[in-house]
Image (spheres, rainbow, N blue to C red):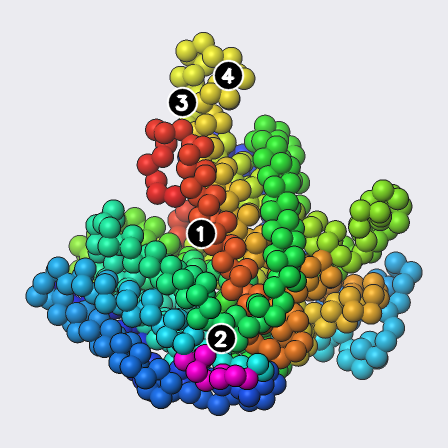
Amino acid sequence: MNDASGNPAAAQADSRRLRAPGWVFPALLLAVLILSVLRFDLIESLLGIRARGLLVSRIPLWELALQHLGLVAASSAAAVPIALGLGIAAVRFSESGLRALLVAAGSAAQTFPSAAVLALSVPLAGFGFAPTFLALSLYGMLPVLHNTIAGLEGVPEAAVDAARGMGMRPRQVLIRVQLPLALPVILAGVRTSVVINTAAATLGAAMGAGGLGLPIISGIRSFDPALILRGAVPSALLALFADASLRRLEDRARRAAGGKPDGRGA
Amino acid sequence: MTVDWIALAGAGAGLVSAAALPFLSLRPNRILAGVPQYAMEVLGAGSVLIFTAAAAAAVLAALRRRHSGLDAAGTLVSGAGLASLLPLAGAAADRLAGDSAVARVSAGPGLWLAAAGLGAALFSFSRRLPSRSALRLAAALAIPAAAAAAGLAGLLDDLSLVRELLSRRDTFTAELVRHLALAGGSAALGAAVGIPLGLAMHRRPRWRGLISVAVSGAQVIPTLSLLGLLIVPMAALGAAVPYLGRIGVRGVGWAPAFVVLFLYALLPIAGNTFAALGAVAPEALDAARGMGMSRRQAFLRVQAPLALPVILAGVRTAFTANMGNAILAALVGGGGLGTLVFLGLAQAAPDLILLGALSTSTLALAADRALALAFRLAVSRGLRSEAP
């Protein structure tokens, strides 16, 4: 959308200088995140509040943060390879209608709220880690699938033709030409997936999976703003960190693919 | 012509799961564990209908190599099988529940997978029909029509999902209205603020970085965390401004949910407006100016109409996403269909969760389709080439 003319592209570069100082921003977020998890009492004394209740004394905040991180990491590790494989298969065998089916099913599934996917996995998998993992893995597949298809189809026909002309077999064309060129778009899908899952994992607390949502939900129930902040601040920082660091990765892939440093917007 | 592998796999999987997996599940009451019920036992002659439809669809998919005309027959057969699933399940539920008012009959994996398989087959067959063919339209309408007719005839009343709805009809309607008001109102406000914001980003490069960081940051932060972070300021706002306090601005309730949904709607709307205005070809603007239009005229008569499709696409995305996200309002006592989902979770009643979830996603899909149609009419005719 923003590769249309010289003027917006220059403006994009301008806004980039303003918002993307390399790895400094993600690193700063990570530092604040770790600090907030280990020494939340500093934030509390800054605001002049203190969370009470059983939850604070029973489970340390870093343990909840690790639970949260574990949920997101495990579900993304399951979702990304499966969705990538499905996306590659969809483009490769698009004649069979697999692509059309996956795109239609994926966009219909996207309208299903993530909270409902989580809630419905409870009768399937019981309470705790399992249903949350199941729901996050399924839901996290959608953006990766969508972007894998879009990315592979966005590879210029000329590049594929040239690779074929050099005598590459279909598998080589895929691995050495199509995937590297599609990587920035695929990584954008991975970023969306991880950010969505970081958010959905806060809801895992309602399914007994723990995580940083636990203090938020307990705090809302007992109307304890300090307890809510104990979960809300680190989870917000975690999501912002995941977004910022994966964006840097995306920029690197975009440079490696020979594109402009910033082509987001779509 | 090749074999339609998608339809073959879908119909085959539908046949196997309808025959071999529990089609329904009967619970003596809402809490006891379910007893699996198989299609052959509970559907009687109806099971023959489903098995035949699925088997015929599979055969037609395999025979496509010889006759391309088989697509129409496949559409018909798989559509008929799919449309008959729900009425048959309802009738079987009526027999299973008998006179018991507390017995619960819910859909089993067999029914779900048969529906998914036949749906995939129908999708694959009908996809190759001409886009304006009557059969394709009929297939798209027959399934919801069959479900609606069965529902109105009372045939589905003994399915647990419908019982959950009937036993709380008044609450359901109230929550539905509240859901629509929350999601629609916040998205409308998002459009009212987001479009000028996108315009400002386009006109004033100096604000651009700040606005885009703020707006996309709000999108990244988890909904639940944002709701939590808003509780204290909203409570303070309600206490400080008596009028706001009177209309219900408090730390919990509709107000924080509304603000969060509004913030979520802002990004797609402002972002798309900005991108759309920037993507208008400079040549078109030059031509307009060259024809003697003033800046204002060039904007109103050339740039804005050209950018409109993309701007409206952002509005549509925001409305659709808000319909789903509004489910979280229930967590802070904001009401809406999420109330049913979280109540179902607390009561371990999957059908209640499903009722809330299905009605929410139906709303989201309906909003998406309705806005696609409405916005298509708003766009200048020369720009309407893309399908909605």
Q: Are marks 2 and 3 in contact (CB under 8 Å)?
A: no
Q: Nearer the viewer, mark 4 or mark 1?
A: 4
**Quick check: do tags 1 and 2 share a chain?**
no
B96 drawn magenta: yes
Label 2 and label 3 in one chain? yes
Distance in Å between CA atoms under marks 4 and 1: 39 Å
Which residue was labeled with disc 2? B159
Q: Mark 1 sits on what residue?
A: A254
Which chain's residue wears label 3?
Answer: B
Q: In the rendering, at what x and y percent does residue A184 appear?
A: 44, 55
Please state the extent of the stretch shown in magenta in the rendering.
B92-100
Tell me whether marks 4 and 1 sit on the same chain: no
Residue A26: percent from left, percent from top:
64, 57
Numbered label attached to residue B297: 4
Q: Which residue lies under the disc numbered 3?
A: B284
Pinpoint the chain carrying mark 1: A
Kind of residue indicated by mark 4? Gln
Secondary structure beneath label 4: helix
Closer to the N terminus: mark 4 or mark 2?
Answer: 2
Residue at the spot 89% in from the left edge and 63% down from the top edge? A49
